[in-house]
Amino acid sequence: MQQLSTKHLLGIKDISVSDIELIFETADNFKDVLNRPIKKVPSLRDITIANVFFENSTRTKLSFELAEKRLSADVINFASGNSSVKKGETLIDTVNNILAMKVDMVVMRHSSPGAPHFLSKNIKANIVNAGDGTHEHPTQALLDAFSIREKLGDVAGKKVAIIGDILHSRVALSNIFCLQKLGAEVMVCGPITLLPKHIASLGVKVELDVKKALAWCDVANVLRIQLERQQIKYFPSLREYSLYYGVNKKMLDQLDKPIVIMHPGPINRGVELNSDVADSEHSIILQQVENGVAIRMAVLYLLAGVK
Ligand code: CP
C-alpha cells in the first residue's frame, strides 16, 4: 500500500505534490464507493476518531463524521460550547482526556492559528486540521482542487481567482498552496483592506476589480465575508461590498467564455454571491460538498496507515 509522507494533515504548505496526488487517487476510489447502494467499507473498523470542534461548523463537521462512518470507524464528537472548556480546562488537558479513552485520531477545528500543530507535538494520535483560525483549512483546499480536476479534467494550467475576504480566510491560504503545487495560476481579488499586505510574495496575481478577475479566470472561488473575525470596519457596509464585489449573473452573462463558480460555504447570499449565480449551471458548490466526503475518507484512511 502507498503511504503518505506525513503522520498528520496540518496544512497544505508542508505536504508534497505526491501526497496530494495519492489523496486524489484514493478519493477517486472512495467516490466510487459512495455511489454504490452500500456506501460503507470496513477500512477503519478498529480505529476510533474524535472530532474536536472549538468553532462552529456545518459542512466540515458533518463531512468528517460521515466519512468516518463510511469507513466503519468508531466516532466521538466534542463541541466546546457545552464542554468543560467552559470551566477553564486547557486545550491539551481536553485532548489528553479524550485520548485517555484510547482515541487513535483527532480531527480538530480551533480559532487559534497553529493549535493543531501544537497538539501534534504533544500527543501521539494522528491530527487532522479541520481549520485553524485564519491560517489553513487543508481538507477544504483538497476538495476544492479535486472538484476543479473533476470539472475541468486537470488543475495544471488553469487560472483560478479567489475573490472576497482573503485577509481572514484559511480557505484562501490553503487553496493558494494547493493550486500552485498542482500547477494552476492563482489570482486574489477583493477590496484592498481585505487583502493581506504581502500576499503577492506568495506568487499570486493581485486584482482589485472583480470584473477583471472574472474575465481572467477559468474558475472563480468566491469567499465569505467573515464578519465574526473583523474587529474593525474593512468596508463601509455589506450593501457597498455587494455593489462592488458581489458576483451576480449579469457579470457572468457579459463574459464570452465558460466559467466555473465555487464557494466553500456558508454563503452570504446577496453579499459575496447572488442566488442567480450560486444556483446556476456555472456553480459546482454542491459538488464540492459531495467531494468533501470522498476527500476526507481518503485523508483519514491514508493517515491511519502512518503511525
Ligand atoms: N467550508 C467550511 O469550512 O464550512 P463549515 O464552517 O460549515 O465547516
Image (spheres, rainbow, N blue to C red):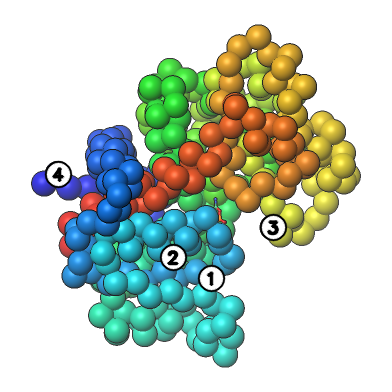
Q: Quadrant of the C terminus?
A: bottom left
Looking at the image, which residue is at 77% across and 33% down? Answer: 245
Q: Earlier in the sequence, mark 3 or mark 2?
A: 2
Are there few (<14), some (14-19), or many (20+) residues within 10 Å of tag 2? Answer: many
Residue that numbered label 3 is attached to: 229
SS class of the residue under badge 4? loop
Using the image, determine if residue 49 lies above or below residue 218: below
Spatial separation of the CA atoms under disc 2 and disc 4: 25 Å
Q: Earlier in the sequence, mark 3 or mark 1?
A: 1
Q: Nearer the viewer, residue 194 or 103?
A: 103
Residue that numbered label 2 is attached to: 108
Residue that numbered label 4 is attached to: 2
- Determine the residue located farthest toward the left in the rendered image: 1
Q: Nearer the viewer, residue 63 or 87?
A: 63
Residue that numbered label 1 is attached to: 54
SS class of the residue under badge 2? strand
